[in-house]
Image: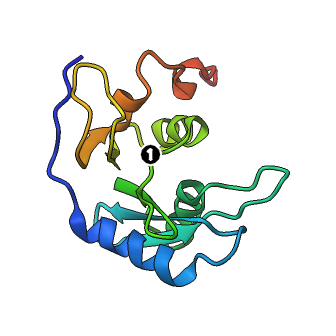
Amino acid sequence: MTTQASRVDHELIDAAAHVARTRCRGDNHTIAAAARARDGRIVTGVNAYHFTGGPCAELVVIGAAAAQGANELVTIVAVGDRDRGVVPPCGRCRQVLLDYFPDIEVIVEGAERVEGGEGGGTRSVRIRELLPVTYVWADHQLDEQ
């Protein structure tokens, strides 16, 4: 698998950073996410931390996008509060993003390496590159007969 880095959507990073800076307060909301829909709209959200395992910001954005009729997301990014910068999605979010939007681009930064690529720098990669050789939910659904 060869990594094909795409153009980074800096407007999306700025939108998530703005939400992280202005809406993330205390320990309950520490990550903001922003996603761009196919029609160009930007949808944002924050995580809802809870000791029982609340939803990550990326999952909140998926729900908010659906509620707004933005059913086709093309790019997503998460940004930490307190100027922590771009944060890669956790394993659960990677799996959900792959299942809902198998062609979505994810903006990542830092030392994380994707198969066939190099670490460092902000880049946009397909979700499949962040979760290679994975279980694909749709592949295992029984066809209705």
Quadrant that contains the N terminus:
top left
Q: In this rendering, would 3 be left or right of 93? A: left
Q: Taking 142 as reference, is 38 above or below it?
A: below
Quarter of the image holding residue 42? bottom left
Residue 119, quarter of picture: top left
Residue visible at 54% across and 70% down?
45
Q: Which quadrant does the C terminus fall into?
A: top right
Q: Nearer the viewer, residue 25 or 131?
A: 25
The residue at which mark 1 appears reads as: 88
Which residue corresponds to the image point at 31% horizontal and 72% vertical from the top-left? 14
From this view, report whether residue 9 is shown above or below residue 143. Answer: below
Q: Residue furthest right?
A: 52
**SS at circle 1:** loop
| Residue shown at the point (32%, 29%) measured from the top left | 113
Total numbered circles? 1
Residue 34 lies, in percent from the top left, at: 42, 65
Q: Eyeballing the image, is 56 above or below 115?
A: below
Q: Within 10 angstroms of label 1, few (less than 14), some, or many (20 or more) residues?
A: some
Observer able to see residue 72: no
Mark 1: amino acid = Pro
Q: Position of residue 55 (x, y in %)?
A: 68, 55
Q: Whole-percent x and y of residue 80? A: 49, 62
Q: Is residue 118 left or right of residue 81?
A: left
